[in-house]
Amino acid sequence: MSDDKQDGMPLHFRILIALVVGTVVGVAINPGAIELPDEQIAAELKIEEVEAGEGFSVDVKESSGFESVRRKFQSREALNAALPQLAAGVTESGLPAATITIAERAVHIVEAAGRITIDYTRKHNGQPVSTTLKVASADELPEHWREFHSQHGGGWKRTLTAAAKYGGDLFLRLLKMITVPLIVTSLITGVAGLDNSRFGAMFGRTLAYYGITSMLAITTGLIIVNIVRPGIGAELPGGTEAVLAGGEQSLTGILLGLVDNMIPTNPIQSLASSSFLSIITFSIIFGVFIVRTGGETARVLRDFFQAAFEVMMRLTMAIISLAPYGVFCFMVYATASQGLAIFATLAWYMLAVFLALVVHSCITLPLIVKFVAKRSPLEFARAMSPALMTAFSTASSNGTLPLTMTCVEDRAKVSNKVSSFVLPLGATVNMDGTALYEAVAVLFIAQAYRGDMAIAEQIVVAVTALLASVGAAGIPHAGLVMMAIVLQAVNLPLEAQGIIIAVDRVLDMCRTSVNVWSDSCGCAIIAGLDSSTDASKES
Ligand code: ASP
């Protein structure tokens, strides 16, 4: 897109520079952890049965007055097994006084606009334990922490870190602002642009292809992110905020909730409350009925939504052009509060996304081309290479569309009848790379916030990642904007996205190529199926 090169320098270079400069500034002002000396405490252990049959809890109260920690055990046996670890010398139930060594005590104070976060990590007899407090002002802190904060908190470094966090959050607000209008205009325009005569067999097959390949991509992403587990042990800035519910509902309950969500009782209310699933289904249905209504009415509405979509695309690009500032702020905040460790975290996350994209584009899709379309995947890829490379460099399926059509028709010899239907709709609706990316990114965030995710919740991620990819426009970083949908579905806060914006461009380039590759393979497959139907009709 033209805005991409606004000041002469491509956006991705500006983002890269912001990443480097932000890191340098953040590392320079990192106030570091406040280390406390090891101590031996006479801990008070309080053992209780949580609820009949639900296990036991043990409260360990640190004598220094700092914190007490509650640990839960499923059974008496598990509790007994852990007691010697927890407190040397204790093996029985009751209320023993025990001596616990508290070592490697470190306190991080992060002060962001209107919020103080205190992270207190230490080891109880070698077992890592952490406590996090989040309050709006120092007055709300418990007495001992208030004293601690008045001694160690504040200072210009923390003020600067707080300002950086605020700046980054403003950028996230802008992204949030455009999500709803972008989904609505992009989807209605994509669907309403279809030709009524095409709502036949080809429509069904094309939708089936889109759905199946996107789900395969998501499954690949989920498998790989569960193997690599990039988020486990990772600390995302601001991550401790999420002590969230979830994973406790039954699968049926969750799925029924999703279905309920997909059929809004009041679409206007859904728009106002950013209920994404409702918005997506209503927009698709509205688009289909624009086509069904036809005539002058359809023309007026098509033109209207097309015009609105163009405006939204320009607005999105304008906001995305601010990404270097957002990335700068996030990097300052991340490295000032966590140091360089954040890079190791991001590297694993990128590796997981990249690996999954490679498996989907180099194994799954080629196999489908070979066995369903009965074409050589290698030759087909060669024919599509100009479009794939353009998709990679522009990170925009929409921008690449004219070239994709030319390659599919002229170089890969697929009929215009198929390509003119499969490609334009696919550029909006079929985004395997984006779907996969949504799933991996959200699982990464969930792993960092609250550990491995239950299967039931992963299914919700899969379904909503599919819908998010359907709703995403084919422009740079649209997948990032849409991630709100998936985060919302599993109760993760939008702020979790902050740091992954820094590396989004590279991943966007990769996933856009996969999006375009999947659309192109779709053409080969629909054309293959079409010709075999035609052949069987003739014989
Ligand atoms: N840039 C992608 C595309 O145009 C969408 C995304 O951000 O995932 O296909």
Image (cartoon, rainbow, N blue to C red):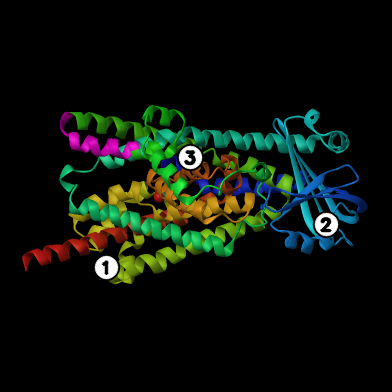
Observer-nearest residue: 24 or 398? 398
In the rendered image, residue 412, in percent from the top left (x then y), is placed at 25, 63
Q: Earlier in the sequence, mark 1 or mark 2?
A: 2
| Mark drawn on residue 467 | none
Mark 2 sits near ligand 1, with its Cβ under 8 Å away = no
Residue position marked by numbered label 1 in the rendering? 372
Task: Report the residue at 41% width, 39% height from top.
Answer: 261
Instruction: Say which of marks 2 and 3 sits in front.
Output: 2
Q: Which residues are magenta?
A: 282-296
Instruction: Say which of marks 1 and 2 sits in front.
Output: 2
Mark 1 sits near ligand 1, with its Cβ under 8 Å away = no
Tell me: residue 260, above or below residue 37.
above
Q: Earlier in the sequence, mark 3 or mark 1?
A: 3
In the rendered image, residue 509, in percent from the top left (x then y), is placed at 46, 54
Tell me: residue 369, above or below residue 250.
below
266 left or right of 325? left
Measure the alpha-carbon separation of dots 2 and 3: 69 Å
Task: Report the residue at 88% width, 34% height from top.
Answer: 147
Tell me: residue 29, above or below residue 219.
above
